[in-house]
Amino acid sequence: MTPQPDVVPPPPADEHRGARLPSLTGMRFVAAFLVFLAHCSVQGFFADSGLQSTLQDLFVRASWAGVQFFFMLSGFVLTFSARPGDRITAFWRRRAAKLYPNNIVVCVVVVLLLLITGGTLTVAQVVPNLLLVQSWAPIPTVISGVNTPAWSLCCELLFYALFPLLLPLLDRVPARSLWWLGAGVLAFVVAMPTVAAALPDGPLTGVNPPVSFPRLWFVYGFPVVRLADFVLGMVLGRLVLSGQWPRVGMFPATVVVLVSYAATVAAPVLYAADATMAVGLACLIGAGATTDLAGRPSLLAAPRAVALGEVSFAFYLVHVPVLTFGHLVLGGRSWSTHEALVMLTGLFTISLVLGRVLNAWVEVPAMNRLARKRTPTRT
């Protein structure tokens, strides 16, 4: 019997397929928190300009690693948990249910808050953000015009659209050749900053040191280039499923991540945006997966860590509006270090609570409702 034309071909059978990987769920919130810290550092909460600048230099690059982690983890998890015989349309429907409801709700709320506070937005900003196509052109006012973190969902949308086409191609790669394929994808990631440096110049970004926005967008925000991170995660998923990934513990993997981040801090901006963290993040994801599969304990697999990981997507979407409008309500000024930390702790708590509400009232119901519409596969 052969699959119907719209059926995702089943990946190679493996005893671990479908196994729970709680450590990876716990990691999700760590990545989201890094992005939160980055956006805290650019809001101007701290009166100490030297501290403000140091925090921005440190955490902006950490947030780049957090976003790259999400992209790689998406490829890994979808490959690891691919459903044999799953219809492409059912897969796309579930993925759309994951992205759009949360994004639409947050986008509408932000627009309403801007109207109330006297802010301005154009249709050219709102519509691309609602449709999740805002990151396809290097236009800063469109990419971050409504809710800055949502640009990454534009990339995820491309990943999800292509996954049913990429998975059969990956499954045809012999297990012994997966490492070579991973090395090739990694080489592509490392080469992109050189390509970006050859692009025409443009307005400078606010990162330190300043860099042309179109060049940074090419390596950091362009969905086609960021597809390489997703594919690298897919290859990593196959390596773990086939038993080829070495059982490196979480501690050594964390050391590799820290070394990679030290390189990220020291590297030129275009390399720091994506290339320098790829190996470290691959080690961390692989270590987390093999730790869970082996039944070894992990702090990130603890129930509270997993619970935070489950709301990380919603938290990720709401935290910038909370920081922005919260700062506005608090007077929009800067405070002493102690006062700023108190303010940010409060805004973090609000973001976490609203993320939990969004997850419980929008994300989970949308996923459950559309999941029930799955059509049984016929062969």
Image (cartoon, rainbow, N blue to C red):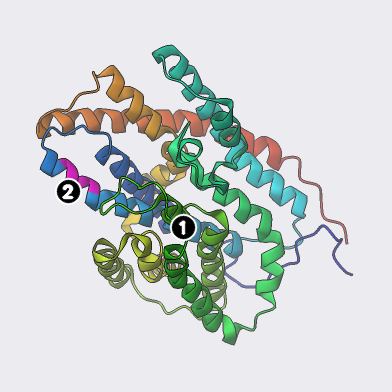
Q: Nearer the viewer, residue 194 or 42?
A: 194
Quadrant where the image shows the N terminus: bottom right
Placement of the C terminus among the 4 image quadrants = bottom right
Asked if residue 356 is among those painted magenta in the image, a careful observer would answer no
Label 2 crowd (10 A; few <14 / some 14-19 / many >=20): few
Name the residue that disc number 1 marks: 200
Q: Is residue 132 above or below residue 252?
A: above
Q: Tag 2: residue type?
A: Thr
> Residue placed at 52% from the left, 54% from the top?
222
290 vs 318: above or below: below
What are the residue bounds of the magenta stretch? 52-56
- Residue 53 is one of the magenta-drawn residues: yes
Q: Is residue 31 left or right of residue 229?
A: left
In the image, 342 versus 149, the foreground residue is 149
For the question of whether residue 20 can be seen, the reply is no
Tag 2, which secondary structure?
helix
Given contact means CB atoms under 8 Å apart, are the residues at marks 2 and 1 in contact? Answer: no
Residue farthest bottom in this picture:
176
Specify whether residue 10 is in view. yes
Question: Label 1 sits on what residue type?
Answer: Pro
- The overriding secondary structure of the stretch rendered in magenta is helix
Residue 264 quadrant: bottom left
Please give left or right for residue 71 compared with residue 208 in the image. right
The mark tally for this picture is 2
Residue 343 x, y percent position in the rendering: 21, 28
Residue 7 lies in quadrant: bottom right
Q: Label 2: which residue?
A: 54
Nearest to N terminus: mark 2 or mark 1 = 2
